[in-house]
Image: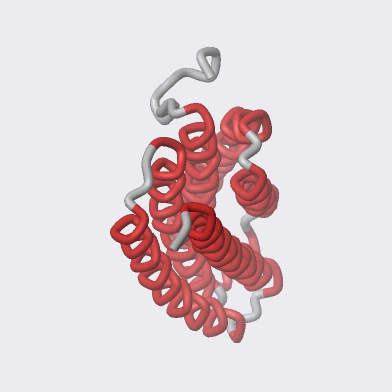
Amino acid sequence: MSDKHLARGFEADLHLLSTRLLEMGGLVESQIALAMKALNTWDVALVELVIEGERRLNAMEIEIDEAVSNIIARRQPAARDLRLLMATSKCVANLERAGDEARKIAKRMRRIATDGAARSINIAEIKVSGEMASQILRRALDAFARMDTVAAAQIVQDDEAIDNEFRAFVRKLITYMMEDPRTIAIGLDYLFIAKAIERIGDHATNIAEFVIYVVKGTDVRHVSHEQL
């Protein structure tokens, strides 16, 4: 087989891998949307849909990781191609964990729905941060598809906004708990949900950082925003 045919075969392998990664990302976006809808509408029936979707995510993670291993074994890539395959595997892990967080939100919401005190707590910050996390994940996947380092760097900066919403909600939650001890149990449930949303934003940010790693060959996971 000629080098040209080998190159085309390798490109086809990478394209298929990228397609599967983006499909998995789309499923995670759907999971987050369902979890947030359940929280907004108190529809416990949506919880089972999120749990079922999480099983599919687990299967996709295994499938894509196996594909990455097979490509590395058969093609023995180097430089940027190797970085792309390594980053793909890490992105898949982050997507699976983001899906786990969506499942946690949905399951915690099922508990909250039976508590009469739940509706007395204003969760505006949770709703805002949930939308932010979903948008950042979508942008991170788009940056990965286009290998857009400028967009990726901006995502890393923007994740701070989700952290700010989380901190604002924690401060408000403490006030609720101090004024009415009966809200402590439900407040802790909401705190769990807010933390899960913050982690989804973190996973999306990790994906953006891997874009920079693939293109520039530089690991930026622990550099400051100014350095980035």
Q: Nearer the viewer, residue 106 or 32?
A: 32
**Image height check: is 71 above or below 175?**
below
Q: Is residue 96 left or right of residue 163?
A: left
Query: What sort of colour scheme is used for the picture?
Result: secondary structure
Residue in the image at 50% along x and 27% along y: 216
**Residue 123 in sight:** no
**Image height check: is 195 above or below 64?**
above
Residue in the image at 45% along x and 72% along y: 60
Quarter of the figure with residue 92: bottom left
Q: Is residue 34 left or right of residue 221?
A: right
Number of numbered tags placed on the structure image = 0
Instruction: Pinpoint residue 193: horizontal percent, then vertical percent.
Output: 50, 57
Instruction: Pinpoint residue 128: horizontal percent, then vertical percent.
Output: 69, 48
Q: Nearer the viewer, residue 62 or 214?
A: 214
Residue in the image at 45% along x and 52% along y: 88
Instruction: Pinpoint residue 136: horizontal percent, then vertical percent.
Output: 64, 45
Quarter of the figure with residue 23: bottom right
Residue in the image at 66% along x and 29% along y: 150
Report the quarter where the N terminus lies: bottom left
**Residue 42 in sight:** yes
Q: Nearer the viewer, residue 114 or 85?
A: 85
